[in-house]
Image (tube, helix red, strand yellow):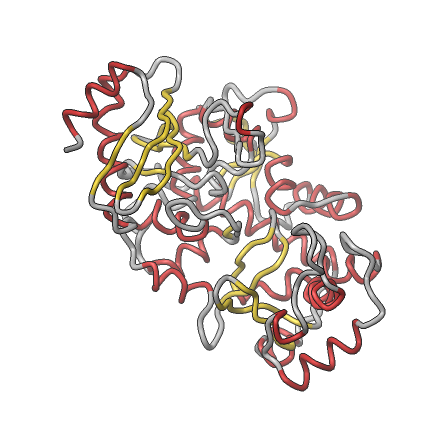
Amino acid sequence: MTVTLSADEARRIILRAQGFLGADARRGGAPATLRRLGAVQLDTISVLARSHELVAYARLGAVDRRKVERAYWDVPPRAFEYWCHAACILPLDDWPLYAFRRRAYRERKYRWHEVPPIVDKVLEQVREIGPVTTADLGGAKNGGAWWDWSESKIAVEWLLDTGEVVCTRRVGWRRVYDLAERAVPAQLLAQDLSDAECVTRLARTAGRALGVATRADLVDFLRLKGPHSALLDAALLDGSAGLVPVRVEGWTGRAAQAWADPAALETAPRGRHRTTLLSPFDSLVWDRPRTARVFGFDHRLEAYVPKDKRVHGYFTMPVLTGGRLIGRVDPAREGSTLVARQIGLEPGVTPERAAGPLAEALREAADWVGCDAVRVERADPLLLQALSALIP
């Protein structure tokens, strides 16, 4: 049978699945958050903090940033970096599930760059002197633009793609590479899953993390293509993915058919999460069509848009309060001051309603990153007036 959900019920199930609702949302700290989400996207941009830190902060509050780092890059390792929705931190227990992608890279024999002939030499270097960074291998760049990688960098990233080496920690934001056979527990290395088994189990992981999802949502979470997306279809239809069919009122077209984690349907989500700023790479909002469908929010990252063409700002962070996305903040830091360069509200959200939650979110974020003052530069005049009374 297909379960029917209201749009509001689906939204609350999604918020609970993502760690924003429920009594146990904060239990287990950052390691449990990673296991719950299945994947935490990485990005080089750092404004208030790096995105992977912001993901933990949004769910846990003012968590010690060193604890977040240890949750991702600990010794012995409990996570590794690989390609899921994008470059992500993934639970180390999920290493066997990405065998399908490692095989696909080997078969393709191409990365973004031509794979150089020194791959075997670089692998032997890692074997002899690892763990290593690109600095140990001769440097990451040829001296040009950021994508002008050295041959050793291309080679070691290819070895990462194909699973010969693995990254389980970073030093100064640089990946540390080591042989998979040294860094990944033997019982995980020994698992030899077929492509169908990998995709089926990852579909279950993605469905649990998303709570309620369309096929397109699951494909986007895992970035599946061609034959691998066909394996997903088969796993959904025969039930092996462990997800059940649902319909959500108001989700139309291809989104009319959705899937849910059956455990998420057993009880109604309860509680409210505090107001918080979200990384634009947070898995709650990283999928733009899904964010529009669930929250009615047009989420855009403008960091790579020319400055004169930006509408909302460089690193615009959606504001979550009361289970809704009410607006967005473009933050910056000037010394010990958190600066809101621009604040925008969603249609229908009044300055009177938004001022309190926004002031709370800005003060908490400032405290977390070690700022002792907040300054708002640009916003609706009524909102500016209200915020000035709430933020000393």
Q: Is residue 373 left or right of residue 218?
A: left
| Residue in the image at 73% along x and 77% along y | 123
Judging depth in this view, the residue of 365 and 2 nearest the camera is 365
Q: Position of residue 60 (x, y in %)?
A: 31, 50
Q: Horizontal placement of 79 versus 132: left or right? A: left
Tell me the quarter of the picture where residue 340 sits: top left
Looking at the image, residue 116 lies above or below residue 339: below
Please state the horizontal and vertical placement of residue 25, each as a whole percent of the image: 33, 49
Residue at the image position 42 percent from the left and 31 percent from the top: 11
User: Residue 212 versus residue 372: which sits nearer the camera?
Assistant: 372
Quarter of the picture holding the C terminus: top left
Q: Look at 67% across and 86% down and name the residue there.
A: 128
The quarter of the picture where the N terminus appears is: top right
Above or below residue 286? Residue 307 is: above
Name the one closer to the observer, 56 or 365: 365
Q: Which residue appears farthest toward the front when viewing the image?
A: 143
Write the residue at 74% across / 75% down. Answer: 122
Disc tally is 0
Please provide percent x and percent y for residue 288. Answer: 55, 31
**Rendered location of residue 336, percent (x, y):** 26, 46
Q: Is residue 317 left or right of residue 244?
A: left
